[in-house]
Amino acid sequence: MPDQDRRTDLAVEISDLNRTFGDQEVLRGVDLSIGRGEFVAMLGHSGSGKSTLLRVLAGLDTEVGGVVLAPAERAVVFQNPRLLPWRRTLDNVVFALRGPDAVVRARDALAEVGLAAKEKSWPLTLSGGEAQRVSLARALVREPQLLLLDEPFGALDALTRIKMYQLLRDLWGRHRPAVLHVTHDVDEAILLADRIVVLSDGVLSLEIGVDIPVPRSRNAAGFAALRERL
Ligand code: ADP
Ligand code: MG
């Protein structure tokens, strides 16, 4: 997959993307562009092809038709944090890095997600929310230009999820990767994203935020109200 042209304002450009498994056409002529630093949410029913599209963007699936341009530096966070259970928390983040400053950078990343005190903990002793925060730290420590999130909060309880929304928005504000956040939770998409696209049976059927702007002010106001009540 070629590196996206650095002169454009786009982080991702997909045109006429097709993916079939046997006779099943899972993605059918998908067009999608994501600007640098833009936060896009993708909604869709289970089985609509969201994870398939995300895997293509992650470079994990190249058996596709059409044009896919994405930055070389990208990171993925899945619903399951996928931490290595035999490595302590800090080592799970260091693992994503190379170079002499790897440990320092990993410590900074853990501190950024509020887990400095857990650096020596084993992954299996972390709560679901903590494990997912480690997973976010591991993704962002490489300063990706594209962050791909596949229902990252789907396994968390509602209160933990709200705290994760705040954390993710803060992290995004500081690092400014382009984000494609896959979810089937409409409220989550509205609260987090600047633009929402809807995948339906492998076709991008609706785009909210271009013609109908997502109310950005709702993010700030919503978080402020939530913070007061938590
Ligand atoms: P979503 O993430 O929106 O729930 P997926 O992208 O996981 O949907 O799956 C879309 C469709 O593609 C499903 O019908 C699924 O069974 C099929 N599919 C996904 N990956 C494979 C695969 N590796 N082999 C065969 N079928 C697959
Ligand atoms: Mg999926």
Image (cartoon, rainbow, N blue to C red):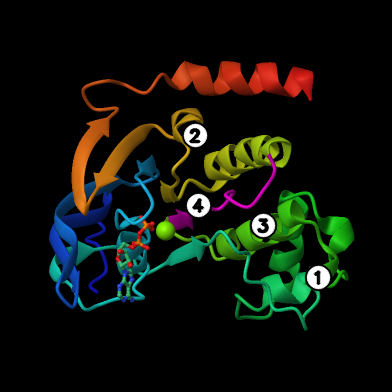
Q: Which residue is mark 3?
A: 132
Q: Main secondary structure of the magenta part?
A: loop
Compared to residue 35, the image places residue 47 above or below, namely below
Q: Which mark is residue 124?
A: 1
Q: Secondary structure at mark 2?
A: helix
> How far, Cα to Cα, is label 3 from label 4?
11 Å
Mark 4 residue crowding within 10 angstroms, few (<14) / some (14–19) / many (20+):
many
* Tag nearer the camera, 3 or 4: 4
Q: Which residue is mark 2?
A: 192
Mark 3–mark 2 CB contact (< 8 Å): no
Magenta segment: does it hold 153?
yes
Q: Amino acid at mark 4?
A: Glu
Q: Earlier in the sequence, mark 1 or mark 4?
A: 1
Percent x, y of residue 149 = 48, 55
Q: Earlier in the sequence, mark 1 or mark 3?
A: 1
* Tag nearer the camera, 1 or 3: 1
